[in-house]
Structures are given as structure tokens and as C-alpha cells.
């Protein structure tokens, strides 16, 4: 069902690939969110089900999911308490996918500021020439990569917000 790249101990999920039209040529997008939850090879969690809906509505038939922090956790407070939530191979996977896929959605909310990780990843993307990033209307980014948030739960906006 999904292709995933986990660390050997499965504490970190670096990548999840979900396709829903395998017989058609792939039209993928990339999503960068905060951290992985329970989704794995066998199924999507609620967040990724919404991401699939948004991606489909935008004309894609696959998404590649990466995160600022690769630690699998259902609790952002627990993720923040972990000594190394980024994961040793996370940047390599973000870099590889961002280099290959043209459309990148960012959706990490205010928790992305933890350990200055949002700026690190925005810098990584900028070094790849990837400065045109898509996000929902509830936030915007200035030329200095400074995020302004009105709603950190933008992933749960109603589908009609894409229309």
C-alpha cells in the first residue's frame, strides 16, 4: 500500500510514499510536515488521509511525505523532549526528494521552530534552489524565511480552501 523508509529500529520514519493511481504516470508532490505519527506500510493516519485529499484536489496522484523531525511520535511534546528527534538520515532523505519533485507543500506549524529546525530545512531547500514552497493561505513566508502563523493546524482546513 505505502512505501516507507524507516530506521532499522523503526524509531524514525524518513519517508512515506503513497500512490493512488498506480496504472497512470506518476504526478507526485512532496509534503514536509512536523513529524511522523502512526502511518506506515499498511495504512495512512488521519493527517495523511487529509494530505491525500489535498493532493488529489490539486491534481496529483502521489505524495512523498517527509518531516522536519523523523522521530515517530503521536505527541509533539514527547517529540520535543527526545534528545535527537531529527534522526541521523533525515536531511539526506529530504534533500533527495526535494531535488526530484517539483511541487513542495510545507505544513509544520509553529512547532517547526523547535531546535530552529524550520530554518535549517528552509536553508537546505534554498541551497537546492527550492525557494518556491506552497502552503495554505493561513500562513505566509517572507524573503527572509520568516513564517507568520495565524493557524498552526492548517492541515485541517476544509477542502474547499483549495478551490
Image (cartoon, rainbow, N blue to C red):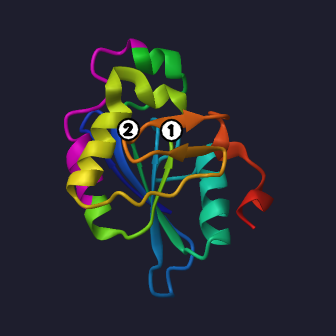
Q: Which mark is residue 68?
A: 2
What stretch of residues is rendered in magenta? 81-96
Q: Residue at x 45, y 72 (%)?
A: 28
| Residue at the top extreme, as displayed | 81
Q: Which residue is denoted by mark 1 in the rendering?
A: 108
Q: Position of residue 145 (x, y in %)?
A: 39, 42
- Pinpoint residue 134: horizontal percent, then vertical percent: 51, 58
> Between residues 105 and 143, which one lies in front from this camera angle?
143
| Callout 2 crowding tier (Cα within 10 Å): few <14, some 14–19, many ≥20 | many
Question: Mark 2: which secondary structure?
Answer: loop
Looking at the image, residue 11 lies above or below residue 91: above
Residues at marks 2 and 1 touching, judged by CB atoms closer than 8 Å:
yes
**Residue 37 in view of the camera:** no
Q: Circle 1 — which element?
A: loop
Outermost residue, bottom direction? Answer: 24
In the displayed structure, 159 sits above or below 116; it is below
* Residue 135 coordinates in the image, percent (x, y): 55, 53
Amino acid at each position: 500500500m505505502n512505501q516507507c523508509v524507516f530506521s532499522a529500529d523503526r524509531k524514525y520514519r524518513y519517508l512515506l510514499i503513497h500512490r493512488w493511481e498506480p496504472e497512470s504516470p506518476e504526478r507526485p508532490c512532496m509534503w514536509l510536515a512536523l513529524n511522523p505519527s502512526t502511518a506506515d506500510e499498511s495504512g495512512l493516519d488521519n493527517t495523511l488521509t487529509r494530505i491525500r485529499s489535498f493532493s488529489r484536489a490539486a491534481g496529483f496522484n502521489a505524495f512523498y511525505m517527509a518531516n522536519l523531525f523523523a522521530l515517530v511520535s503521536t505527541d509533539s511534546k514527547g517529540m520535543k523532549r527526545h534528545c535527537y528527534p531529527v534522526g541521523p538520515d533525515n536531511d539526506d532523505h529530504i534533500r533527495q526528494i526535494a531535488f526530484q519533485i517539483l511541487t513542495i507543500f510545507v505544513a509544520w506549524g509553529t512547532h517547526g521552530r523547535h531546535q530552529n529546525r524550520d530554518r535549517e530545512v528552509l536553508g537546505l531547500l534554498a541551497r537546492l534552489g527550492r525557494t518556491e514552497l506552497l502552503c495554505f493561505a493561513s500562513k505566509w513566508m517572507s524573503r527572509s524565511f520568516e513564517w507568520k502563523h495565524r493557524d498552526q493546524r492548517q492541515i485541517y482546513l476544509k477542502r474547499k480552501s483549495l478551490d
